Image (tube, helix red, strand yellow):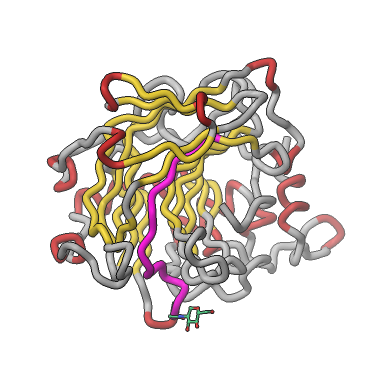
């Protein structure tokens, strides 16, 4: 899962709950496939268990190993989705990931699009992160982090990635939560080579929770993440000739977020986003080119964490400015 493994703010955001109800979208009518139709076990042998004729899969992390699965096919663009229920209670150090990557094919210049769920100590909620890399752009992490408007360990919720040649949209229960529009100036940083889908659960003790302060505690194992309602509506790519896609998904390239969903997305981002690289001036003095700066998002993040998202002119104790801190340092500062 390359990239930014240190920069985890540890913020408890209990206020500002906005109820964003699920709603129908074009992607709701897509066929649900079985595990066997789309996926194959990747690692963790007995820690991957298939239930209900392939409609449900349990991925377990215990003292011995994590586990994961991978799609049979490589895809160039498409809509990919699963319902996921995360382990409950004490989950510090545990990471559950649902993502696309071609890191095994392109070691130096891989592409990646990620949902990552970061466990937490008892009584604190899971946090969700999205990120992407294009053509090995691992020096430019494009992380955003959010809290959710529900407890993701209580029920199944749908997490979806729409990837076209011009945009990436992340959805939670059909609500778009992040839209990345490709710009010319991104160059190769926009994912553009075929990728496979992955789901994994693993021990990320060294970085996941408060910069490694809270490690996986196997007293609470096994940690079980449940996956169901698999949708893979993509352009499968011929593995012999990776440049020839077997379908034409022009309908996806035209995907636009309808105004009603735009408003939901803004509400979510203004009320539930806890980190965005686009506003982290210590990290990027100039935001990367795809960033669309929103005054509301900037203000909300500044309120939450003035150190990371202040405007650089803010005077702190003794009139000293604080900037150019390392990410690990900021994670500590932001802890309780
Ligand atoms: C992607 O990376 C490779 C290897 O570093 C490079 O040759 C190629 O030009 C890059 N492609 C784009 C679109 O930037």
Residue 211 is covered by the magenta coloring: no
In the displayed image of the protein, which residue is found farthest to the right? 318
Q: Can residue 21 be seen in this snapshot?
A: no
In the visual, does 99 lie left or right of 60?
left
The residue lying toward the viewer, choosing from 279 and 29, is: 29
How many labels were placed on the picture? 0
In the visual, does 27 lie left or right of 97?
left
In the visual, does 105 lie left or right of 280?
left
The residue lying toward the viewer, choosing from 204 and 55, is: 55
Residue at 60 percent across and 62 percent down: it is 280
The residue lying toward the viewer, choosing from 170 and 13, is: 170
Residue 197 is covered by the magenta coloring: yes
Q: Can residue 143 be seen in this snapshot?
A: yes
The residue lying toward the viewer, choosing from 234 and 276, is: 234
Q: Quadrant of residue 154?
A: top left
Q: Position of residue 119 (x, y in %)?
A: 58, 32
In the displayed image of the protein, which residue is found farthest to the front? 240
Q: Position of residue 184 (x, y in %)?
A: 38, 82
Residue at 20 percent across and 49 percent down: it is 260
Q: Position of residue 194 (x, y in %)?
A: 35, 64
Is the residue 132 above or below the residue 38 in the image? below
Q: Which residues are magenta?
A: 187-201
Residue at 47 percent across and 73 percent down: it is 189
- The quarter in which the C terminus is drawn is top right
In the displayed image of the protein, which residue is found farthest to the top? 219
Is the residue 161 above or below the residue 294 in the image? above
Residue at 38 percent across and 59 percent down: it is 195
């Amino acid at each position: 899962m390359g990239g930014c493994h240190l920069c985890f703010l540890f913020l408890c955001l209990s206020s500002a709950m906005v109820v964003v109800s699920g709603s129908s979208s074009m992607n709701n009518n897509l066929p649900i496939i079985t595990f066997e139709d789309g996926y194959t076990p990747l690692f963790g042998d007995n820690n991957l268990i298939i239930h209900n004729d392939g409609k449900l899969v349990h991925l377990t992390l215990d003292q011995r190993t994590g586990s994961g699965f991978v799609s049979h096919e490589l895809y160039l663009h498409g809509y990919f989705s699963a319902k996921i229920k995360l382990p409950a209670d004490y989950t510090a150090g545990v990471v559950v990931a649902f993502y696309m990557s071609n890191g095994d094919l392109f070691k130096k210049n891989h592409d990646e699009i990620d949902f990552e769920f970061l466990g937490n100590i008892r009584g604190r909620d899971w946090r969700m992160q999205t990120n992407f890399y294009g053509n090995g752009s691992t020096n430019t992490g494009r992380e955003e982090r959010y809290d959710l408007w529900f407890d993701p360990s209580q029920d199944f919720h749908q997490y979806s990635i729409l990837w076209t040649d011009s945009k990436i949209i992340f959805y939670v229960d059909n609500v778009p939560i992040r839209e990345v529009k490709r710009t010319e100036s991104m160059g190769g940083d926009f994912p553009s080579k075929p990728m496979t889908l992955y789901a994994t659960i693993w021990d990320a003790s060294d970085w996941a929770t408060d910069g490694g302060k809270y490690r996986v505690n196997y007293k609470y194992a096994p940690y079980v993440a449940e996956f169901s309602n698999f949708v893979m509506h993509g352009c499968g790519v011929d593995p012999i000739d990776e440049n020839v896609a077997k379908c034409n998904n022009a309908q996806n390239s035209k995907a636009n977020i309808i105004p009603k969903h735009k408003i939901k997305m803004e509400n979510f981002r203004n009320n539930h986003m806890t980190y965005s690289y686009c506003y982290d001036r210590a990290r990027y003095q100039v935001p990367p080119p795809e960033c669309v700066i929103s005054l509301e998002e900037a203000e909300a993040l500044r309120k939450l964490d003035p150190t990371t998202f202040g405007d650089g002119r803010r005077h702190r104790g003794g009139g000293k400015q604080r900037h150019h801190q390392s990410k690990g340092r900021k994670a500590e500062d932001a802890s309780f």
